[in-house]
Structure formats: structure tokens, C-alpha cells
Amino acid sequence: MATLTLRGLRKSYGAVEAIKGIDLDVEDREFVVFVGPSGCGKSTLLRMIAGLEAITAGDLTIDGKRVNDVGPADRGLAMVFQSYALYPHMTVRQNMGFALRLARVPRAERDRKVEAAAAILQLGPYLDRTPKELSGGQRQRVAIGRSIVRNPKVFLFDEPLSNLDAALRGQMRIELARLHEELQATMIYVTHDQVEAMTMADKIVVLQAGRVEQVGTPLQLYHHPANLFVGGFIGSPRMNMLPGRIASSDAAGVTVELASGVRLKVPVEPGAAQPGDAVTLGIRPEALMARTDGELAGEVQLVERLGGLTLLHVGHGADLPLIVQTDGADASRARTPIRLAVDAAACHLFAANGITLPHLVTHRLVA
Amino acid sequence: MVPSVAVLLLWMIVPLVMTVWFSFQRYNLLDPSVGGFAGFDNYAYLVTDPDFWVSLRNTMVLLASVLVITVGLGTLLAVLFDQDFPGRGIARVLAISPFFVMPTVAALIWKNLMMHPIYGVFGAIAHGFGFEPIDWFAEYPMASVILIVSWEWLPFALLILLTAVQSLDHEQREAARMDSAGVVAQFFFITLPHLSRAISVVIMIETIFLLTVFAEIFVTTSGGPGNATTNLAFLIYARALLQFDVGGASAGGVVAILLANVVAFFLVRSIARRLEV
Amino acid sequence: MERSLTQRALITALGWGIALLLFFPIFWMVLTSLKTETGAIATPPQLIFRPSLSSYIDVQERADYLRFALNSVLISVGGSVLALAFAIPAAYSMAFHPSPRTRGTLLWMLSTKMLPPVGVLVPIYLLFRNAGLLDTQFGLIVIYALMNLPIVVWMLFTFYKEVPNEILEAGRMDGARTWSEVWFLLLPLTLPGVASTGLLSLILCWNEAFWSLNLTSSGAAPLTTFIASFSSPEGLFFAKLSAASTAAVAPILVFGWLSQRQLVRGLTFGAVK
């Protein structure tokens, strides 16, 4: 049971401002993911919440109580570190029970809680081993177990899966989601991997250069990015960005003319945008289809076959190649001409200042 | 931090001030009638004393020779002991043993059991080959002292450099081999640069101790013959506790401190760049 | 790399040859100590003889080895413990609460070590004489602690620096305050480092010959002084000299062998990464 509020939170190192005023609400039992490129301040923000970094300005409250000046030991939070930070001289049992031991919980109760947590994480057989006798994935689970045992108000995760191999990462993602379900706990999770963000989060916070770019559910961010940065950051492979100009606009949307002269009508509100204004057209790879009557002409430069999916890199004049996502059965070959149809309804238009022109219709999966 | 720095400061400053003070005094432990301010007389006496310049040279010769021998041989031996061979563990323990032997004992063993012209092992070997045994401490006194001190410090260099060699990333060496680097090229372009940090630590620590070598000289040659093996440490000792000339000895002490500071200045500057603090 | 048999044989021979060469003086000392006085100076040197412990008995009777050895133990342990007591808090604050002056302080402490003790011999001698500390164990303990303090602080500093910050942060998240952090995490994590620092300090104290020769005569004299007394003209008694030397070196040598792994860790001064 915990809610968290951040109001105007700032962090400076001397003259350098790393966190530039962040407002955020974390609801009870919510799984919030901080995501952003490296150096965006997401880890710093998490460490400020943990109490490991001092807050330069602003207010941090947990359950309505201001905790700016409360030490990490007294905030009632638990953290899983990227390096796991297990105590190398303690067994798994001692690692997991350390917080309870410091809190002077009687031994019997301590053992019971450690064993319960170990059961959840399938660590039972390893309780008397030391960290160096464990595999990477097991260490990861001990680190998580250590935080579970304390029954904290909020779980903090600092890129916990980045040291694991791809298969294990996928498995741990599922386990963490299950754990969140099971413990009904509030969790804040930092990652640079947007697949983790998309799959696990109730709410994603996209950060860049110490500021919040957008807060929303994964699909909100995917289908209604607030600006060019979020559009480009969320989604893999990345959104294709094409420069263009507004040709005209009416109640049904905005018509944009691309450099090649092709015109597309995108169902968005023009807002303050005038015909003639420069805009950026964002097309997701799955909104492009190879069709003989398609609007865009180009040449296949590279074919990446992932098995179930195929990615085509299509050159079309001077810009970066367009990335097209088709199914695995696609027979395209490199260095052959291709025509692409655009699903205009799924496209995004960004004004010259990067702000999205809002869609006329909200995506049906976004409440 | 405060207490130990304060203690060290006191330990540094009090004797230092006293040394400087005494160096300007006429002060002889045996002759209470002599006294009073001496000005720079003690220093004048010191710098006009040929023994002083010889001792300064001896100090530097000893330092430089032992550093070259121990770091050079130490590096080669470190590479050798990094190779796997039967009984390597025991061989390594034997090789590092001299480090644990106290300087006085080291000096005694070498003087009497090894280098003694009549009863020493060297003499016996020379005899065996039909040569005339050499009276080491009479004929090559400085070389003998250098030999003993190097024997004591070679294991230290070997230990540290061996640890450093062993920490060398095997993939780096394999990459070098893929680039068709031979054994010699690997040593010069991979191993040696990797060792630079460890070598500077060896040089720093050894310098600390080599500037102040005393027991080895005290036991073997007592600075002689003549002044052939008198280093600064021994000169001051002789002044103070054999001739009881506190003023003169203190002047020597001040010079020794200056010398240490000069060496420390260069050394600490070059080390500081390599050591992360 | 696969090596040919000749290469392996060559490396083995070279490795063992050099090891034996370096160890030979020590071996010869032990051998000589077991000979009779006449056997010890026989030419050519005896290799096969009937070992006898008579020299050891003579040495103990004449010079009371055990008293010197006891002094050595007392002074070395005392000096090392005292140095650690000063150095542990100093290194702790330098490593975990560094100030802009920390780096300078460390380098300065180290440079003080290059100052030859002779430079301050006279004032220390006079101070000791006036304070009645000449030829006392306590006097040497203090001197040895101060003498080794810079190196001890430096070594501990490098060990503390090796403790990953995230582990301490994890401790803080688990509810550890300064004292539990030091007691449950830092101390166990750096115990090997503290041990190897203490070992080195012990060896340096045991073998120190400058202050012990100049500041003690008989009462508090450690083994270095005991040995130096055998270098006088009567030192032609090679067997007794060897027996005394062996007796003086043996404890620290065995100690060094047993703890060499620990010691190596400490000796590298953070130079090996």
C-alpha cells in the first residue's frame, strides 16, 4: 500500500542540472517504468526516490509524508541493483534475511519469511550457497528475493535485467510481471530497453535530458506519442520519419506533401498549423505495405529475415531507408524495385517544434 | 582521518624542526663545553667534506643499481613464473623467501657464508675451478652491497609483477597472437605496457626503502673500506653515534630530507598520474 | 599455447634453477647451522655430515635467544596493532568521505615515508633519552607504528576503495545505519585486506634494523639487535652464527610462507587491476 508523489524534483551536481523539475504521481500497486536513452537521468531519479541521492529542490512524498530528509534506511523501500549488489560474504539465506536481522525480527519469523520468498522465486535449494556459487539468473532472483522479504512500500528496480542473456531476460520479464500480480505491490522500474517498458508497465515515463517527455500507458505512448522524441523512442524497429509540408487541411484531416511530391491525408487536427508549414510524417514499419499500387516507390536495399517477420530496408531518394515490417513469407529480394502503400490513418504528424498534431480518433485499445 | 594525520604531522614536524635547529648548533654529546649558534658552519663543514659527496653518490648508485636489477630481472622472472611447470607453486615460494629475511641476517649470510674469501661458497667454487678466490668486500665493496640488497628486493618485485602478469587478460594475448605477434613482440607490446602500473608501484616502494639502506652496510662493511660504501644514512649514523657530533649529523639529516623530497617530488608526480585515488 | 616437450623442460629447469639459486643462501645457512664449528669452515665445504643441534643450544645459552624473540614478537605485534588502530579510521574516512584534499593528503603521507630515518635520528634519539624511552619495548612500538603508518593507510585505502559502492547502498536500503554498515558489511568485506596489511606491517617491524639498533641495547632489543651482535670479530663461529640467524629468521619465514597468498593481495597496493 503506497502512493508516491514527485513535485518539482530537481538535482544539481554543482552547476550541472541532471534532473530539471519532475512532477509525477505513482498510484498504489502501479508498475511504473522510467525509460529513456542513457544519460537521461532515469537512474538518478530512481536513486533520489531511494534516498541514495540527495534532492536539490522539490518535494518527494510517500503516502502523503514528505521524505526528502529521511535516509534510505527509513523510507521503507527496497531496491534491486543492476549489479545485484549481493553481500558476497553471506549465504543466500543471510542475504535475504539481512534487512530483517537489522530490524531485529526474531529468527524463526525471519526464516519463515525468507523461505516463503525463496519458494516464490524457486530459490529453495540454494539457500545455503554464497552468491559466487550461483548463476547470473539465480543471483538476480536472490536480489529480488532480498527485496520481497522486507515487504517494502515500493520496489525500486535499476535496470535489473541488463546483465542477463536474452533468453533469461525474457523469462525474468514474465516472472517479474507475475510477481507484481502476486504481491500487489507498487513498483518503479528503470530500463533503457523499451521492450521491457512496453511489456511490463502500467505506466511509462519517458525521460530525456532530465525532463519528462510523456507519461502514459504503453499503448498510449505507442499510438499517441506526444512528440517527435517519444514517437522515435518508443517502438522497435523505429518509426520512419519523413520531412514534408502541409498542403491543405479540413475536417477529415491534414494533407501532407512529401519531398517526392506524394500526398497523404492523415486524420489529425491541424491545430495552429497552416498550409505550407514544415512537418514530419511518422510512419511505423507495420503501417507500410508492399503493394504494386502503393504510393511510395523505392528499391529494396536489405532484407532482414527474422523468421516469422521480415524487415525490408527500402531506399527512396536521399533520406534514410524506410523500414517496412512484413510477414515471414515475403519473397522480396535485395536490389529489386518495390512500391509501398501507406496506412495513412496510423501515421503521425509532428509540427516543426516536435509536438504531435493530435489524432482525430483515439486508438481503440487506448482508453 | 584527523587523529592519524595529526599524529603523523607531529611525528614529521617535531623531529624535523629539531633536526633543523640542531643543524645550526654546535653540539657534541661528548664535549659539553662546545655550544652555541653555529650558523652555517655545520653545512659548510659538510659540503667541504669529500666523504659527504661520496656518500651522496653512493646513495644514488645503490638506489639506481638495485632498481634496475630488481625491476629488470623481476619482470623477466614474473613472465617465467607465469608459465605453468611442475612444482611451480613450491618454486615460487622458494624464490620469494629472501623477502622475509631480515636485512641484518641477509648481510651476515652473504658476508660470511657466501662471499667469505676463505670459507665462503663462492671461494670454494672459485677453488674448484682453480681460480684465486676474490675478497669481495675488500675488492668490490659497492657491488657486494648491491648484490645483497638486490637479493632482498628481487622477490618483492617478482611478487608484485607476477600478480600483475597473471591479471593480464588472456584474450588480449590471444588477440596479439592472431595479429601474429611473436613471444618477444607480445612481451614488449602487451605484457610490458600492462605492467607499467605495477612497475611504478615497485619503484615507489623500493625507493622508499633503498634511500635508507642501513643494516646491510652496518653489518658488512661499516661504510668501508675507506668510504667506498658509505651512503648518506650511514654517514649521518657515523657522525651522530660514533663521533657524537650532533650538529654535523643534523646538517646531514637536513640534506637527506632535501634529497628525499627531490626524489619524492619526481616519483610522486609520476606515480600520482598512474594511481587512481 | 601447446608447447613442445623441450620447451616445457627448458621452462621447468629455468624456473626451478632460479628458484633454487635465490633460495640457496637460506638453505646454506640452515645447513651450516647443523654442522659443528670445524665442519662449518671445512674446505671444500661439507655436504654430507652428521647434523647436530649443539650450535642452537650454545646460542641460547650464550645470548638468551628466547628473550630477544619475545621482544620481537611483542614489538612487531604491538607496532602493527597500533598502526592499524590509527590507520583504519583514517583510511575509512578517506575512502568513503573523500574531500578535495584527500588525494593530496595520501600522497603527502606516502612521501613522508621516503624521508630517511637517519634524517631525524638525532632528535628522536635525544627525545627518547629525555623521555626515558631508550631501550624500552614501548618506545619501539610507537616508532614502528609511526614508521609504517603511511604504508598501512595507503594499503587499507586501496582495499576500502575496492568495496563496490552498490553493496553499501544495498545495505542502506536494507536499513543499515553507519554502525551496522561498518560492522556487518565493511568489516567482513575488508577483513582479508586488513589482515594482509597487518601481515606486511608485521614483517616490516620484525625485520626493521635501523631504529632497533640505535634505540635499544639489551633490555628491549629484538632479534635484529641479537643478530647484529654476531657480526663482531667473534663472528667467525660460522655454525653458531648460522644457528642464530636461522632462529631469528625462521618464525617470520614460516609465517611468510603460510600467508603468502594473503600478503600478495596486500602488497599490490591497488596496482593490479
Image (cartoon, rainbow, N blue to C red):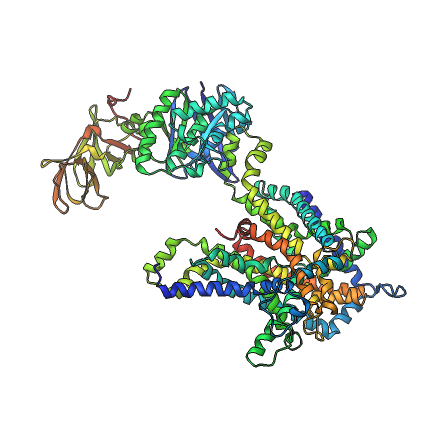
Question: Residue A25 appears in which quarter of the rendering?
Answer: top left
Expressed as whole percent of the image width and height from the top left, the position of residue A65 reads 52, 20
Residue A287, visible in the rendered structure: yes
Most distant residue in the front direction: C50
Question: Residue C228 appears in which quarter of the rendering?
Answer: bottom right
Give the answer, above or below, for where C257 lies relative to B144: above
Give the answer, above or below, for where B2 lies relative to C271: above
Give the answer, above or below, for where A171 lies relative to A367: below
Expressed as whole percent of the image width and height from the top left, the position of residue A69 reads 56, 27
Residue at the image position 75 percent from the left and 74 percent from the top: B48
Expressed as whole percent of the image width and height from the top left, the position of residue C273 reads 48, 51
In the figure, is residue C206 to the left or right of A111? right
Give the answer, above or below, for where B161 lies relative to A235: below
In the figure, is residue A252 to the left or right of B21? left
Which residue is nearer to you in this view: C223 or B243?
C223
Which residue is nearer to you in this view: B131 or B3?
B131
Expressed as whole percent of the image width and height from the top left, the position of residue A253 reads 21, 26
Which residue is nearer to you in this view: C177 or A291?
C177
